[in-house]
Image (tube, rainbow, N blue to C red):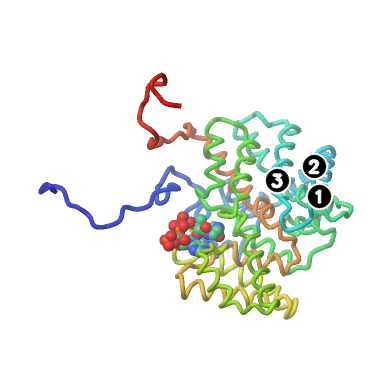
Amino acid sequence: MTSSTEVKSSKKPADTRGLAGQTVGDTQICQVSQTELIYRGYEIADLAEHATFEEVAHVLLVGHKPTADELKRFKDELVSMRAVDRGILEVIGKIARSEPSSDDAHPMGILRTGISLLSHVDPDCEDNSPEAQMRKSKRLLAQIPTIIGYGQMSCEGKTPVDPDPNLDLAANLLWCMTGEKPSELNAKVMDVSLILYAEHDFNASTFAARVIASTEADMHSAVCGAIGALKGPLHGGANEKAMAMLKDIDAYIAAGNGDVDSFMAEAFAEKRKLMGFGHRVYKNGDHRAGILRSWGLKIAEQNGPDAKKWFDIGDRVQQIMFEQKNIYPNVDFPCGMTYFVMGIPVPQYTPIFVASRITGWCAHIMEQHQDNRLIRPLANYTGPALTKWNEARS
Ligand SMILES: CC(C)(COP(=O)(O)OP(=O)(O)OC[C@H]1O[C@@H](n2cnc3c(N)ncnc32)[C@H](O)[C@@H]1OP(=O)(O)O)[C@@H](O)C(=O)NCCC(=O)NCCS
Protein backbone atom coordinates (compact mmCIF):
# COMPACT_ATOMS: atom_id res chain seq x y z
CA MET A 1 0.00 0.00 0.00
CA THR A 2 1.19 3.53 -0.70
CA SER A 3 1.63 5.73 2.36
CA SER A 4 0.01 9.15 2.38
CA THR A 5 3.38 10.83 1.75
CA GLU A 6 4.28 8.63 -1.22
CA VAL A 7 2.80 9.42 -4.61
CA LYS A 8 2.94 6.55 -7.08
CA SER A 9 3.79 7.81 -10.55
CA SER A 10 2.31 6.11 -13.59
CA LYS A 11 5.06 7.68 -15.73
CA LYS A 12 7.77 5.37 -17.14
CA PRO A 13 11.11 6.18 -15.49
CA ALA A 14 13.47 8.04 -17.85
CA ASP A 15 15.92 5.79 -19.68
CA THR A 16 19.24 7.07 -18.35
CA ARG A 17 21.40 4.42 -20.00
CA GLY A 18 24.29 6.01 -21.88
CA LEU A 19 24.14 8.89 -19.34
CA ALA A 20 21.11 10.22 -21.26
CA GLY A 21 19.88 13.45 -19.75
CA GLN A 22 22.70 13.58 -17.16
CA THR A 23 24.79 16.73 -16.74
CA VAL A 24 28.25 15.51 -15.77
CA GLY A 25 30.40 18.63 -15.62
CA ASP A 26 30.94 22.29 -16.49
CA THR A 27 32.47 23.77 -19.62
CA GLN A 28 33.06 27.27 -20.93
CA ILE A 29 33.68 26.04 -24.47
CA CYS A 30 30.31 25.14 -25.92
CA GLN A 31 26.59 25.15 -25.19
CA VAL A 32 24.37 22.54 -26.80
CA SER A 33 20.62 22.79 -26.27
CA GLN A 34 17.43 21.99 -28.16
CA THR A 35 17.40 25.49 -29.56
CA GLU A 36 21.02 26.54 -29.85
CA LEU A 37 24.61 25.53 -30.56
CA ILE A 38 27.05 28.11 -29.25
CA TYR A 39 30.88 28.13 -29.32
CA ARG A 40 32.18 30.39 -26.51
CA GLY A 41 29.26 32.79 -26.95
CA TYR A 42 29.00 32.67 -30.75
CA GLU A 43 25.99 31.00 -32.38
CA ILE A 44 26.76 28.36 -35.03
CA ALA A 45 24.80 29.91 -37.93
CA ASP A 46 26.53 33.23 -37.26
CA LEU A 47 29.95 31.53 -37.30
CA ALA A 48 29.15 29.51 -40.45
CA GLU A 49 28.09 32.67 -42.25
CA HIS A 50 30.72 35.14 -41.08
CA ALA A 51 33.80 33.35 -39.71
CA THR A 52 36.50 31.15 -41.22
CA PHE A 53 37.59 27.82 -39.76
CA GLU A 54 40.91 29.28 -38.57
CA GLU A 55 39.02 32.04 -36.73
CA VAL A 56 36.76 29.44 -35.10
CA ALA A 57 39.80 27.33 -34.19
CA HIS A 58 41.29 30.41 -32.49
CA VAL A 59 38.06 31.04 -30.60
CA LEU A 60 37.99 27.44 -29.37
CA LEU A 61 41.69 26.97 -28.57
CA VAL A 62 42.82 30.42 -27.47
CA GLY A 63 39.45 31.47 -26.09
CA HIS A 64 38.53 34.65 -27.96
CA LYS A 65 37.86 36.13 -31.42
CA PRO A 66 41.28 36.99 -32.89
CA THR A 67 42.28 40.49 -33.93
CA ALA A 68 43.59 40.75 -37.50
CA ASP A 69 47.18 40.54 -36.17
CA GLU A 70 46.42 37.58 -33.93
CA LEU A 71 44.74 35.76 -36.80
CA LYS A 72 47.68 36.35 -39.11
CA ARG A 73 50.14 35.04 -36.50
CA PHE A 74 47.90 32.05 -35.74
CA LYS A 75 47.56 31.14 -39.43
CA ASP A 76 51.28 31.64 -40.13
CA GLU A 77 52.14 29.45 -37.17
CA LEU A 78 49.79 26.70 -38.36
CA VAL A 79 51.27 26.84 -41.88
CA SER A 80 54.79 26.58 -40.45
CA MET A 81 53.79 23.44 -38.53
CA ARG A 82 52.22 21.47 -41.41
CA ALA A 83 55.19 19.28 -42.36
CA VAL A 84 55.13 15.80 -40.79
CA ASP A 85 58.22 13.73 -39.94
CA ARG A 86 59.29 11.76 -43.05
CA GLY A 87 59.56 8.46 -41.16
CA ILE A 88 55.98 8.81 -39.94
CA LEU A 89 54.73 9.56 -43.44
CA GLU A 90 56.49 6.46 -44.76
CA VAL A 91 54.64 4.31 -42.20
CA ILE A 92 51.34 6.01 -43.11
CA GLY A 93 51.98 5.39 -46.82
CA LYS A 94 52.84 1.76 -46.19
CA ILE A 95 49.68 1.08 -44.16
CA ALA A 96 47.50 3.00 -46.63
CA ARG A 97 48.84 1.03 -49.60
CA SER A 98 48.19 -2.27 -47.80
CA GLU A 99 44.53 -1.43 -46.92
CA PRO A 100 41.81 -2.43 -49.36
CA SER A 101 40.72 0.71 -51.22
CA SER A 102 37.00 -0.06 -50.87
CA ASP A 103 34.54 1.97 -48.79
CA ASP A 104 35.23 -0.47 -45.97
CA ALA A 105 38.88 0.58 -45.60
CA HIS A 106 39.62 2.47 -42.41
CA PRO A 107 41.59 5.69 -42.85
CA MET A 108 40.39 6.44 -39.30
CA GLY A 109 42.68 3.63 -38.13
CA ILE A 110 45.50 5.09 -40.20
CA LEU A 111 44.91 8.53 -38.69
CA ARG A 112 44.77 7.11 -35.16
CA THR A 113 48.12 5.40 -35.80
CA GLY A 114 49.50 8.63 -37.28
CA ILE A 115 48.58 10.66 -34.18
CA SER A 116 50.11 7.99 -31.97
CA LEU A 117 53.34 8.16 -33.99
CA LEU A 118 53.34 11.97 -33.82
CA SER A 119 53.51 11.71 -30.01
CA HIS A 120 56.98 10.15 -30.33
CA VAL A 121 58.43 13.10 -32.22
CA ASP A 122 56.61 15.87 -30.32
CA PRO A 123 59.10 17.52 -27.93
CA ASP A 124 56.20 18.52 -25.65
CA CYS A 125 54.55 15.11 -25.56
CA GLU A 126 54.74 14.53 -21.80
CA ASP A 127 54.44 18.21 -20.82
CA ASN A 128 50.92 19.12 -19.68
CA SER A 129 51.67 22.79 -18.96
CA PRO A 130 49.22 25.22 -20.64
CA GLU A 131 51.95 26.53 -22.98
CA ALA A 132 52.97 23.03 -24.11
CA GLN A 133 49.32 21.99 -24.50
CA MET A 134 48.71 24.96 -26.80
CA ARG A 135 51.78 24.15 -28.91
CA LYS A 136 50.62 20.52 -29.22
CA SER A 137 47.07 21.59 -30.14
CA LYS A 138 48.39 23.77 -32.97
CA ARG A 139 50.73 21.06 -34.26
CA LEU A 140 47.90 18.51 -34.32
CA LEU A 141 45.56 20.93 -36.07
CA ALA A 142 48.23 21.74 -38.66
CA GLN A 143 49.45 18.18 -39.26
CA ILE A 144 46.24 16.14 -39.40
CA PRO A 145 45.44 17.31 -42.99
CA THR A 146 48.97 16.30 -44.03
CA ILE A 147 48.46 12.78 -42.65
CA ILE A 148 44.98 12.42 -44.17
CA GLY A 149 46.26 13.59 -47.55
CA TYR A 150 49.35 11.40 -47.51
CA GLY A 151 47.24 8.35 -46.65
CA GLN A 152 44.65 9.05 -49.36
CA MET A 153 47.20 9.71 -52.12
CA SER A 154 49.17 6.60 -51.13
CA CYS A 155 46.09 4.41 -51.09
CA GLU A 156 45.25 5.61 -54.61
CA GLY A 157 48.80 4.87 -55.77
CA LYS A 158 49.50 8.59 -56.42
CA THR A 159 52.57 10.56 -55.37
CA PRO A 160 51.67 12.52 -52.22
CA VAL A 161 52.04 16.30 -52.37
CA ASP A 162 53.52 18.66 -49.78
CA PRO A 163 51.12 21.01 -47.97
CA ASP A 164 50.64 24.31 -49.83
CA PRO A 165 51.56 27.31 -47.63
CA ASN A 166 49.40 29.61 -49.77
CA LEU A 167 46.20 27.73 -48.95
CA ASP A 168 44.04 28.01 -45.84
CA LEU A 169 43.49 24.88 -43.81
CA ALA A 170 40.31 23.70 -45.60
CA ALA A 171 41.70 24.24 -49.11
CA ASN A 172 45.03 22.70 -48.12
CA LEU A 173 43.23 19.62 -46.81
CA LEU A 174 41.56 19.14 -50.22
CA TRP A 175 44.87 19.83 -51.99
CA CYS A 176 46.72 17.24 -49.86
CA MET A 177 44.01 14.64 -50.56
CA THR A 178 43.92 15.16 -54.34
CA GLY A 179 47.01 17.03 -55.54
CA GLU A 180 44.60 19.45 -57.24
CA LYS A 181 43.81 23.03 -56.27
CA PRO A 182 40.17 23.05 -55.12
CA SER A 183 37.62 25.41 -56.66
CA GLU A 184 36.64 28.42 -54.58
CA LEU A 185 33.24 26.87 -53.88
CA ASN A 186 34.66 23.50 -52.81
CA ALA A 187 37.15 25.22 -50.50
CA LYS A 188 34.38 27.36 -49.00
CA VAL A 189 32.07 24.39 -48.41
CA MET A 190 34.89 22.42 -46.79
CA ASP A 191 35.63 25.43 -44.57
CA VAL A 192 31.98 25.68 -43.50
CA SER A 193 31.79 21.94 -42.78
CA LEU A 194 34.89 22.21 -40.58
CA ILE A 195 33.25 25.06 -38.65
CA LEU A 196 30.09 23.00 -38.14
CA TYR A 197 32.01 19.93 -36.95
CA ALA A 198 34.49 21.74 -34.69
CA GLU A 199 32.83 21.43 -31.27
CA HIS A 200 29.84 19.88 -29.52
CA ASP A 201 30.31 19.88 -25.71
CA PHE A 202 30.30 16.45 -24.01
CA ASN A 203 29.68 14.28 -27.09
CA ALA A 204 31.10 10.74 -26.86
CA SER A 205 34.55 11.42 -28.33
CA THR A 206 35.12 14.63 -26.37
CA PHE A 207 33.97 12.96 -23.19
CA ALA A 208 36.37 10.07 -23.91
CA ALA A 209 39.17 12.62 -24.37
CA ARG A 210 38.29 14.31 -21.07
CA VAL A 211 38.21 10.98 -19.21
CA ILE A 212 41.69 10.16 -20.51
CA ALA A 213 42.97 13.69 -19.80
CA SER A 214 41.59 13.47 -16.25
CA THR A 215 44.11 10.72 -15.46
CA GLU A 216 46.80 13.35 -16.28
CA ALA A 217 47.71 11.39 -19.41
CA ASP A 218 49.17 13.35 -22.33
CA MET A 219 47.19 15.10 -25.08
CA HIS A 220 48.12 12.61 -27.85
CA SER A 221 46.78 9.69 -25.77
CA ALA A 222 43.51 11.56 -25.18
CA VAL A 223 43.20 12.38 -28.90
CA CYS A 224 43.86 8.75 -29.91
CA GLY A 225 41.05 7.67 -27.55
CA ALA A 226 38.77 10.34 -28.99
CA ILE A 227 39.45 9.14 -32.54
CA GLY A 228 38.49 5.63 -31.47
CA ALA A 229 35.18 6.94 -30.08
CA LEU A 230 34.47 9.09 -33.16
CA LYS A 231 35.04 6.17 -35.52
CA GLY A 232 31.85 4.38 -34.48
CA PRO A 233 28.75 4.65 -36.71
CA LEU A 234 26.60 5.99 -33.85
CA HIS A 235 28.97 9.00 -33.67
CA GLY A 236 31.29 10.39 -36.38
CA GLY A 237 31.20 7.27 -38.54
CA ALA A 238 27.57 8.11 -39.35
CA ASN A 239 28.55 10.49 -42.18
CA GLU A 240 30.11 7.58 -44.12
CA LYS A 241 27.20 5.26 -43.33
CA ALA A 242 24.67 7.91 -44.40
CA MET A 243 26.25 8.08 -47.85
CA ALA A 244 26.47 4.28 -48.00
CA MET A 245 22.71 4.16 -47.42
CA LEU A 246 22.03 6.64 -50.23
CA LYS A 247 24.17 4.51 -52.54
CA ASP A 248 22.16 1.43 -51.46
CA ILE A 249 18.93 3.27 -52.31
CA ASP A 250 20.30 4.32 -55.70
CA ALA A 251 21.35 0.73 -56.48
CA TYR A 252 17.95 -0.55 -55.28
CA ILE A 253 16.16 1.85 -57.64
CA ALA A 254 18.54 1.10 -60.54
CA ALA A 255 17.91 -2.64 -60.10
CA GLY A 256 14.17 -2.02 -60.52
CA ASN A 257 13.37 -3.09 -56.94
CA GLY A 258 11.26 -0.03 -56.20
CA ASP A 259 11.67 3.59 -55.14
CA VAL A 260 12.79 5.54 -52.08
CA ASP A 261 9.41 5.00 -50.42
CA SER A 262 9.50 1.21 -50.76
CA PHE A 263 13.15 1.10 -49.62
CA MET A 264 12.18 3.05 -46.52
CA ALA A 265 9.12 0.86 -45.90
CA GLU A 266 11.40 -2.20 -45.97
CA ALA A 267 13.90 -0.48 -43.66
CA PHE A 268 11.15 0.33 -41.16
CA ALA A 269 9.71 -3.20 -41.37
CA GLU A 270 13.16 -4.63 -40.58
CA LYS A 271 13.60 -2.02 -37.81
CA ARG A 272 16.83 -0.81 -39.40
CA LYS A 273 18.52 2.25 -37.95
CA LEU A 274 18.99 4.98 -40.54
CA MET A 275 22.39 6.57 -40.25
CA GLY A 276 22.52 10.35 -40.16
CA PHE A 277 19.18 10.58 -38.36
CA GLY A 278 18.34 11.19 -34.72
CA HIS A 279 20.33 12.85 -31.98
CA ARG A 280 20.75 12.44 -28.24
CA VAL A 281 20.14 16.14 -27.58
CA TYR A 282 18.44 17.63 -30.65
CA LYS A 283 15.01 16.04 -30.77
CA ASN A 284 13.59 18.85 -32.96
CA GLY A 285 16.39 19.02 -35.53
CA ASP A 286 20.14 19.62 -35.67
CA HIS A 287 20.99 23.30 -36.31
CA ARG A 288 23.98 22.31 -38.42
CA ALA A 289 22.15 20.03 -40.87
CA GLY A 290 20.24 22.72 -42.83
CA ILE A 291 23.34 24.90 -43.12
CA LEU A 292 25.46 22.13 -44.60
CA ARG A 293 22.67 20.90 -46.87
CA SER A 294 22.27 24.32 -48.49
CA TRP A 295 26.03 24.57 -49.16
CA GLY A 296 26.19 21.00 -50.49
CA LEU A 297 23.22 21.67 -52.76
CA LYS A 298 25.08 24.60 -54.34
CA ILE A 299 27.85 22.19 -55.41
CA ALA A 300 25.35 19.56 -56.58
CA GLU A 301 23.46 22.10 -58.70
CA GLN A 302 26.70 23.31 -60.21
CA ASN A 303 27.80 19.73 -60.99
CA GLY A 304 24.59 18.75 -62.79
CA PRO A 305 21.80 16.13 -62.54
CA ASP A 306 24.07 13.20 -61.62
CA ALA A 307 25.15 15.11 -58.53
CA LYS A 308 21.76 16.66 -57.78
CA LYS A 309 20.10 13.21 -57.70
CA TRP A 310 21.78 12.46 -54.32
CA PHE A 311 20.07 15.47 -52.78
CA ASP A 312 16.74 14.46 -54.35
CA ILE A 313 17.01 10.97 -52.85
CA GLY A 314 18.21 12.45 -49.56
CA ASP A 315 15.35 14.95 -49.39
CA ARG A 316 12.78 12.19 -49.91
CA VAL A 317 14.42 10.03 -47.19
CA GLN A 318 14.35 13.04 -44.88
CA GLN A 319 10.70 13.73 -45.61
CA ILE A 320 9.67 10.11 -44.96
CA MET A 321 11.68 9.98 -41.71
CA PHE A 322 9.95 13.12 -40.52
CA GLU A 323 6.43 12.13 -41.61
CA GLN A 324 6.55 8.56 -40.37
CA LYS A 325 9.00 8.65 -37.43
CA ASN A 326 9.21 12.31 -36.48
CA ILE A 327 13.01 11.97 -36.57
CA TYR A 328 15.19 14.70 -38.07
CA PRO A 329 18.53 14.43 -39.88
CA ASN A 330 21.67 15.29 -37.97
CA VAL A 331 24.68 17.03 -39.54
CA ASP A 332 26.12 13.72 -40.76
CA PHE A 333 23.27 13.21 -43.23
CA PRO A 334 23.89 16.28 -45.44
CA CYS A 335 27.62 15.82 -44.85
CA GLY A 336 27.56 12.47 -46.63
CA MET A 337 25.90 13.93 -49.74
CA THR A 338 27.97 17.09 -49.67
CA TYR A 339 31.36 15.41 -49.47
CA PHE A 340 30.22 12.91 -52.11
CA VAL A 341 29.36 15.57 -54.68
CA MET A 342 32.70 17.21 -53.86
CA GLY A 343 34.35 13.98 -55.02
CA ILE A 344 35.79 13.06 -51.62
CA PRO A 345 36.27 9.30 -51.09
CA VAL A 346 33.70 8.04 -48.56
CA PRO A 347 36.23 6.49 -46.10
CA GLN A 348 37.77 9.94 -45.60
CA TYR A 349 34.56 11.57 -44.30
CA THR A 350 35.19 10.70 -40.65
CA PRO A 351 38.91 11.56 -40.77
CA ILE A 352 37.87 15.00 -42.09
CA PHE A 353 35.60 15.25 -39.04
CA VAL A 354 38.78 14.69 -36.97
CA ALA A 355 40.58 17.49 -38.85
CA SER A 356 37.88 19.79 -37.50
CA ARG A 357 36.96 18.30 -34.08
CA ILE A 358 40.64 18.28 -33.06
CA THR A 359 40.03 21.93 -32.09
CA GLY A 360 37.18 21.04 -29.73
CA TRP A 361 39.02 18.01 -28.29
CA CYS A 362 42.18 20.00 -27.56
CA ALA A 363 40.17 22.84 -26.01
CA HIS A 364 38.44 20.33 -23.71
CA ILE A 365 41.68 18.53 -22.83
CA MET A 366 43.19 21.89 -21.82
CA GLU A 367 40.07 22.83 -19.86
CA GLN A 368 40.12 19.47 -18.07
CA HIS A 369 43.79 19.89 -17.12
CA GLN A 370 43.22 23.45 -15.88
CA ASP A 371 40.91 22.29 -13.07
CA ASN A 372 41.42 18.57 -12.97
CA ARG A 373 39.79 15.91 -10.89
CA LEU A 374 39.87 12.26 -11.96
CA ILE A 375 36.66 11.30 -13.79
CA ARG A 376 35.58 8.13 -12.03
CA PRO A 377 31.83 7.58 -11.69
CA LEU A 378 30.13 4.75 -9.79
CA ALA A 379 28.43 1.66 -11.22
CA ASN A 380 25.28 -0.01 -9.97
CA TYR A 381 26.19 -3.69 -9.47
CA THR A 382 23.62 -6.12 -10.92
CA GLY A 383 25.69 -9.35 -10.90
CA PRO A 384 25.36 -12.57 -8.83
CA ALA A 385 25.05 -12.47 -5.02
CA LEU A 386 28.14 -12.99 -2.84
CA THR A 387 29.17 -16.67 -2.84
CA LYS A 388 32.01 -18.51 -1.02
CA TRP A 389 34.50 -19.87 -3.60
CA ASN A 390 34.71 -23.32 -1.94
CA GLU A 391 30.92 -23.60 -1.74
CA ALA A 392 30.29 -22.62 -5.36
CA ARG A 393 29.58 -25.24 -8.01
CA SER A 394 31.80 -24.87 -11.07
C1 LIG B 1 22.28 9.43 -32.43
C2 LIG B 1 21.61 8.29 -31.69
C3 LIG B 1 22.69 7.28 -31.24
C4 LIG B 1 20.92 8.87 -30.47
O1 LIG B 1 20.50 7.82 -29.72
P1 LIG B 1 19.54 7.97 -28.46
O2 LIG B 1 19.57 9.32 -27.89
O3 LIG B 1 19.89 6.85 -27.56
O4 LIG B 1 18.13 7.84 -29.12
P2 LIG B 1 17.18 6.64 -28.96
O5 LIG B 1 17.91 5.42 -29.41
O6 LIG B 1 16.67 6.66 -27.56
O7 LIG B 1 16.01 6.96 -29.98
C5 LIG B 1 14.69 7.17 -29.64
C6 LIG B 1 13.80 6.42 -30.63
O8 LIG B 1 14.07 6.87 -31.95
C7 LIG B 1 14.52 5.79 -32.78
N1 LIG B 1 15.63 6.25 -33.58
C8 LIG B 1 16.60 7.11 -33.21
N2 LIG B 1 17.45 7.30 -34.20
C9 LIG B 1 17.03 6.53 -35.24
C10 LIG B 1 17.50 6.30 -36.52
N3 LIG B 1 18.60 6.89 -36.95
N4 LIG B 1 16.82 5.45 -37.32
C11 LIG B 1 15.70 4.85 -36.90
N5 LIG B 1 15.19 5.03 -35.67
C12 LIG B 1 15.85 5.87 -34.84
C13 LIG B 1 15.02 4.74 -31.78
O9 LIG B 1 14.96 3.45 -32.34
C14 LIG B 1 14.08 4.92 -30.64
O10 LIG B 1 12.85 4.29 -30.95
P3 LIG B 1 12.06 3.47 -29.83
O11 LIG B 1 11.71 4.48 -28.78
O12 LIG B 1 10.91 2.91 -30.58
O13 LIG B 1 13.02 2.43 -29.33
C15 LIG B 1 20.58 7.59 -32.59
O14 LIG B 1 19.63 8.53 -33.02
C16 LIG B 1 21.23 6.90 -33.77
O15 LIG B 1 21.71 5.77 -33.62
N6 LIG B 1 21.27 7.56 -34.96
C17 LIG B 1 21.95 6.99 -36.10
C18 LIG B 1 23.44 7.22 -36.01
C19 LIG B 1 23.81 8.65 -36.25
O16 LIG B 1 23.34 9.30 -37.15
N7 LIG B 1 24.73 9.13 -35.41
C20 LIG B 1 25.23 10.49 -35.50
C21 LIG B 1 24.77 11.30 -34.34
S1 LIG B 1 25.21 13.01 -34.53
State the image coordinates of residue 220 (x, y, percent, origin top left): 65, 37
On the image, numbered disc 3 is attached to which residue?
A: 109
Locate residue 191: give its quadrant.
bottom right
Residues 104 and 386: in front is: 386
How many neighbours does mark 2 have within 10 angstroms: few (below 14), some (14-19), or many (20 or more)? many
At horizontal 83% and vertical 45% (from top left) the residue drawn is 93
Mark 3: amino acid = Gly
Q: Earlier in the sequence, mark 1 or mark 3?
A: 3
Residue 260 appears in view? yes
Look at the numbered discs 2 and 1 and tell me whether their residues touch, using CB distance below 8 Å: yes
On the image, numbered disc 1 is attached to which residue?
A: 150
Secondary structure at numbered mark 3: helix
Q: Nearer the viewer, mark 3 or mark 2?
A: 3
Look at the numbered discs 1 and 3 and tell me whether their residues touch, using CB distance below 8 Å: no
Mark 1: amino acid = Tyr
Look at the numbered discs 3 and 2 and tell me whether their residues touch, using CB distance below 8 Å: no
